[in-house]
Image (cartoon, rainbow, N blue to C red):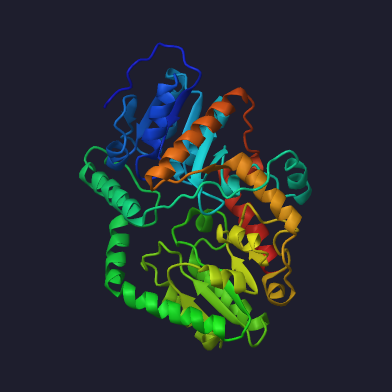
Amino acid sequence: MDAIPPDQSAHAARYLFLQGPNGTFFARLANRLKSRGHAVYRVNFNGGDRFFWRLSGALDFRGSAEQWPAFLGNLLTDCGITDIILFGDCRPLHRAAITLAHRLGQRVHVFEEGYLRPNWITLEANGVNGHSSLAKNARWFLEAAAGIADWSPGLPVTGHFARRAAEDVLYTLSTIFLKWRFPLFRTHKPWHPLAEYAAGAKRFPLTPLTRRRNLALQQQVLKSGCQYYLFPLQLDADAQVRFHSPFGRMAPAIKTVIESFARAAPADALLVLTEHPLDTGLVPLERLSRDYADRAGVGSRVIYLRFGTSEPLLTGCRGMVTINSTMGVLALSVSVPVMTMGHAIYDMPELTFQGGLDSFWCNSAAPNGAVFDAFRRVLAAHTQINGGFYSEKGLTLAVAGAVTRLEAALTNLAIAAPSDADSPANMSWVVGTRLEEKIHA
C-alpha cells in the first residue's frame, strides 16, 4: 500500500506501529486495538514488515535513514498520532523515532523480550533495559511494592523454536525478494541473516553429539566437588552488549572475565561459560574462550557449554558474572550472588555485587531477599505482560495484556523525555565510562 487512507472518525488513540518482533504479534495487537475503536497505522521498512502486516493503514518508507525523521515528523502531524509502538529501542530508526516523539509529545511504548523468564514479555514506556525509567534504588522498590500482590510466575507459556525459526526465515526471504521495493533499507543487525543461517546449518548435524557432550561436561562439573562460577554468554549482536556495556562485543567481555578469574578466583574453582541457546556459532566464541583460558593458564578450569544454562548448574553455582543478561534475574531469584558488567535493570546495591570483578570471586554475597521480592513484584506490575511471541497461547495472552496496558496509559498524559545526559548521543559514553570504573574497581 502506497498511502495511508484518510480516517475522519474520532478515536481514543491513534497508534503508529513501527518494527515488531518477527511474526504476527504486532498485526494481532493492532487488529485488537482497531476493533476497540482506536485508529491504527503502520510504517513498513522492508518486505518482511510488509509480509506480516495484512491490515489497512500501512505506508512503505522507501527513503534513507537521513530522510526518516522528516518523513516521520510529517506522518505524526498529518495523522494526529498519539502513540508510537515499537519493538527494541536501540535500532537506529527507532532511536530517531523516540527522540522525535518526545519532542512532539507522543507517547512511546517499547516491547522487548521479558525481563522475567519464562512466561513474560516486556512493555515499558519510553525505553527498556538501559533506557528504562525505573529507579536503581532498593528503598524505592520497597516503597513501590506496597500494595502490589505477591509474586506469581504467571500462566505457563512455551515458546516454539520451530515457529520462531520459520517466521524468521519468512521475514528474511520477504525482505530479500522485496529488496527492489526498499532499496535503501539497512538492517540494524551487524551481519546479514543469511550468514547466521549458514553458520547454524553447519552446526545442526552435530547437535545430538553436542548435547551428549554437554550433558557429560555438566555432570562432570556437578560431581567434581569444586565450587564453580557461571558466565552466561549473550548473543554477539545483542543490543544490550553493543549499546549498554563497555565491551561492544562478546569477545572482549569473555577475555576480561577469564583473565580476572585466573588472577583472583580461588585456585580450585571452575568457570563455566554457557552459550546463548540461539547462538549459531557465526562468531567463534568457544574457540576464543579456549584461547583466552589457555593464555591465562586456566585452560583446565574453564568449561564451555552450549545450549544455555541448566537449572542444576544455576542452583549449584557459587556466583554468576554477566554483562546484563536476564539470566541475572533468574540467579537472583535462587539467591545466587551476581556481578554485572553492563547496564542491567537489576543492577543495584543489595541485589548485585558493587565491587570490582577481581573482588567478586571471593567476596560476593547473596542478594537481599526482601529487596529482590519487591523488585520482582514492581517489575512485573509495571513492565511485564504474561505471554509470549512464538506460540498461540503466548500470543493470545500477550495481546490481551498489551491492550489492557496500552489503554491504561491513555489516562497518563505526562510524557517524560530523557535528559540531555541520557540522550542516545551521550548514553554510550556515560555507560561505558561508569561501567569500566565498576569492573576494574
Q: Is residue 170 above or below residue 25?
A: below
The picture places residue 336, in percent across and down from the top left corner, at 66, 67
**In the displayed structure image, the side of residue 439 where residue 387 appears, left or right:** left
Which residue is more in the foreground, 432 or 1? Answer: 1
- Residue 151 position in % (x across, y down): 65, 48
x and y percentages locating residue 319 in the rendered image:
64, 71
Q: Is residue 23 above or below residue 5?
A: below
Residue that appears at 75% across and 49% down: 137
> On screen, 254 above or below 420?
below
Image quarter where the N terminus lies is top left
Is 262 in front, or is 408?
408
Q: Is residue 338 visible?
A: yes
- Judged left or right of residue 226, residue 191 is left
Query: Where does the image place residue 364, in percent across and percent down from the top left?
Result: 72, 71
Which residue corresponds to the image point at 43% horizontal and 19% vertical from the top-left?
A: 79
Q: Quadrant of the C terminus?
A: bottom right
